[in-house]
Amino acid sequence: MKIVLKGVISGLGRLLSVEIPQGSVILVTGAEGTLKSGLVFSMISNYLAADGGHGLYVTLEQTKESHFKNMISLGLKKSDNLQIFDYRDMRREWRDCDLDMIKLTDEVIDFYRDKHNDLTFFALDSLNALYSLSEESNLRMQMYHFFSNLRERGLTSFLIMEVPPLMNPGQFQDRNRPEHFLADGTIELGVIEDKGGVKRYIQISKMRAAKHAMEKHQLMVDENGINILGPIY
């Protein structure tokens, strides 16, 4: 089965003109303030509103109320079929215990799959927080199994990862980390300065089994939500 994403964000068809396989695991990377959470939230909500199914957005860094407030401030609408989950109550109950957050996240996904047999999308905000709360030993193997489990469940997944801002033209992010090898796709968000001023951009650097543009495209937010304009260069 294929997932048609090109129409869920205005202008996304400029970058991605075809469907992607259901069960793809996609990294969404970028520095702070580059609209990573907003992009993922908007893509999933808009898809569910148009095509049905259910989605799960897990936030490790904020409460669900705080996250939802931030999305509203961007003018983004939430589909009734998108469930938002945070770990606040679990952390409070198990504050004196070492939790296996990767295993716990798998269990949260299974809980919502049992509740909604048409669960199609999963989002994790963020991988950085998951890493910081997980044991470093065998982390590479744990992430391999985590990615594999997402695919086996048939979930199209967006894993948000904050990275340092690029300081020099032509600089590339470190892609020698396990998540870059394991992911089926990588969407990079960033900020760039040119003669027209400072602009946010989006770039698809990898998307297996799908043709896509490689250029950086301008990313904007207005009263209608997130929009993707033409290439910056």
Image: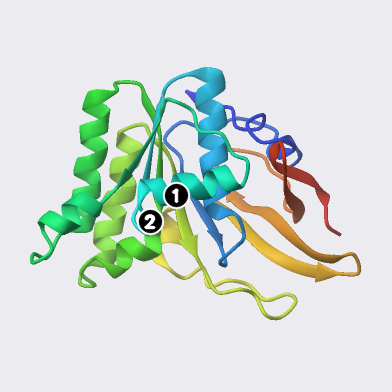
Residue occupying image coordinates x 63% and y 58%: 189
Disc 1 designates what residue? 67
User: Which numbered marker is on residue 62?
Assistant: 2
- From this view, report whether residue 36 is shown above or below residue 153: below
The quadrant in which residue 179 appears is bottom left
- State the CA–CA distance, disc 1 to disc 2: 6 Å
18 relative to 50, above or below: below
Q: Are marks 1 and 2 in contact (CB under 8 Å)?
A: yes
Local packing at callout 2 (Cα closer than 10 Å; few below 14, some 14-19, many 20+) is: some
Tell me if 200 is positioned left or right of 209 in this view. right
The residue located at (56%, 66%) in the rendering is: 32
Residue closest to the far right = 195
The answer to whether residue 212 is left or right of residue 70 is right
Direction bottom: furthest residue? 168
Q: Residues within 10 Å of mark 1 (few under 14, many from 20)?
A: some
**Residue 31, x across and y down, in percent:** 57, 67
Q: Is residue 185 visible?
A: no
Q: Residue at x 55, y 42 (%)?
A: 72
